Amino acid sequence: MTAGPVGPVARERRPTLYFLREIRSFAPVHLDTEVDMTRVGALRAAALAEGRRSSWLSYVLFAAGRALAAHPEANAAIGGRVRRPKVARFASVNGKFTIDHTTNGQRVVLSAIVPDLQTAGLEEIQRQVDHYTGGDADGLPEFAGARLLRRLPWVLGEAAYRSRVRPLRGRAAAIGTVAVTSLSHRAVDGFHSVGGTTVTIGLGRIADRPVVRDGAVTVAPVMRLNLTFDHRVIDGAEAADLLTDLKRLLEEFEDAPARRGGTNDVGELKQFVLAHTRGQKVAGHEEVLARIRDDADGEGSWAAEWTRSAKRLELDGKLLDACRHYSMARFPFVDGAARRRALDETVRTFDEWRRGDPDIERLEVELPNGRVAAWATGMSDGVRRPLLIVSGGIVTVKEQWGPTLAAIRRLGMAGIVTEMPGVGENTLPYDRDAWRMLPGLLDHVADRADVADSYTLALSFSGHLALRAALDDRRIRAVLTAGAPVSGFFTDREWQAALPRITVDTLAHLMDRKPDAALEELREWALRPEQLAALDVPVRYVACARDEIIPRSDVSLLRTHVRDFRSLVHDDVHGAPAHSVETQLWLIRSLLGIRGGNVPTALAIDLLYRLARLRGGAAG
């Protein structure tokens, strides 16, 4: 028999070969069971009737996140030398799923990561699955790493892949902590695979099969569920318990634990708090979120669990970490005694922590409509430095930004961290004139800082205030912001109808209005194109392509009308929880670029930013 043509392996398959070489040390053991998918099927049908599509994969990812959170021994990875192996256990469940993709005529497998499955809601998981499966895989930034591996020579490609996936500290972000792979779209009843994680879940097709219910045989949609585990990390008994729990979670599927009352939807709280816990490095947030069942009172509630964790940290002498946890207990706003106590404790613990730095002081500024409290630095030695004002959005208290004060000093600037009207200790009303708070702060420190050379790092809704203030106050030399509303957010009723409940409720609370009345009043706050065209200061903006709060039209409006406008766009949701490091470095780099000078620092920040972008792209 004559052999066919022989040639090198296609470049498109190189990442797969690198992966297979890395998993040779696995000790796989295989288990399987059958799952009655009647409950999930009914939920899918009901969602479809309401115009929402949910894939079978998303339900399995949701259940896998809860199951792995209940089995932390399995949410782990092994590495190190053969004779001295090490195991890393991860607080967060990151789910990897596989995607069938054709590129340059070659059919290949890609993988994508859905982070924080243990707290993610079904809709958020589905959004991310749709993003990866419905997007152009050859252009998505998350797959830039895979594209790079195809181009590199074999030796360099293999070394690059190995450097990305071998370190235990970065394993969860690189390849996830659990893998889910499916061939259910074909006539495959079941299959076992090694996905590079301690546990890999394989999905077969869903087919009508006989089942026994109440002693009678009936027909139900049944899925073969396969689980492969690495015997080096866990044993068969643990894996069997995990598979049993996963089967139960699917057969008795619930999108969120039942609420026992309370102001907020706990699923939304868990989803939207991640931008804050990650960006501000809130230690141990995954463990706290896993314990929270509702937003009522007592054990298992939002405020109680965050407060319990804060008290333990305070007893250990970790005042700043305790402060951060108290601030999360208050999130998103004070709606009762428990959150009021949490706010008071946030201020108290930060005040105790900052006493270790004699250059951090408390400011209390009386303005015509109320009082603004702030923390300040760089004003105690009689030198009038350029001023940077830092503020967050409608759910962020000033203490969350307090640690940035030391960084501001290192930039040779004076700094103020504060909060929006109605947030935390700020008693000003959040209304159409709320922007006047910023000129009021500048007036208050005019004799101690060079306020004629002032800059605002105003994130989210405070970015809107900064843009408006910069129109009237020439002392503001630049506006740096992320996720700030501009116009469409305030006026687009169709967009407002789809806003997360937590956003609308928080706005209504700050404005002391009912939700519908608050949204109606906001219409008058939109910045007009001629106002944006009149801005003669640089504006730097971090946007998110999948922002569920700020419409894309707001960024487009800035890009069209602001004379000096630059933006960074993340493929992420509001707050860019998966890109917090890149956001911070880009904003600092932008500030240094606008101010000029300090070349060594600017070069160092630029290098760190580029490395962060490269590292973020290598996950694909």
Image (cartoon, rainbow, N blue to C red):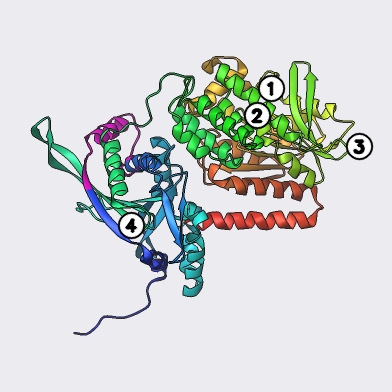
Q: Quadrant of the N terminus?
A: bottom left
Query: Which labelled disc corresponds to residue 382?
Result: 3
Quarter where residue 373 is shown: top right
The image shows residue 324 at horizontal and vertical percentages of 61, 34
Which residue is identified by label 4?
A: 231
> Counting other residues with Cα less than 10 Å from the Cα at mark 3, is it few (<14), some (14-19), or many (20 or more)?
few
Depth check: 236 or 2 in front? 236
Which residue is identified by label 1?
A: 425
Circle 3: residue type: Gly
The image shows residue 210 at horizontal and vertical percentages of 11, 40
Depth check: 193 or 57 in front? 193
Q: Earlier in the sequence, mark 3 or mark 2?
A: 3
Q: Earlier in the sequence, mark 2 or mark 4?
A: 4
The image shows residue 390 at horizontal and vertical percentages of 72, 35
Q: Earlier in the sequence, mark 4 or mark 1?
A: 4
Q: Earlier in the sequence, mark 3 or mark 1?
A: 3
> Counting other residues with Cα less than 10 Å from the Cα at mark 2, is it few (<14), some (14-19), or many (20 or more)?
many
Q: Are marks 3 and 1 in contact (CB under 8 Å)?
A: no
User: From the viewer's perspective, is the residue at label 4 or at label 1 nearer?
Assistant: 4
Q: CA distance from mark 4 to mark 3?
A: 65 Å
Circle 2: residue type: Val
Query: Which labelled disc corresponds to residue 385?
Result: none
Which residue is identified by label 2?
A: 397
Q: Are marks 2 and 1 in contact (CB under 8 Å)?
A: yes
Residue at coordinates 67% horizontally, 58% vertically from top-left? 607
Quarter where residue 462 is shown: top right
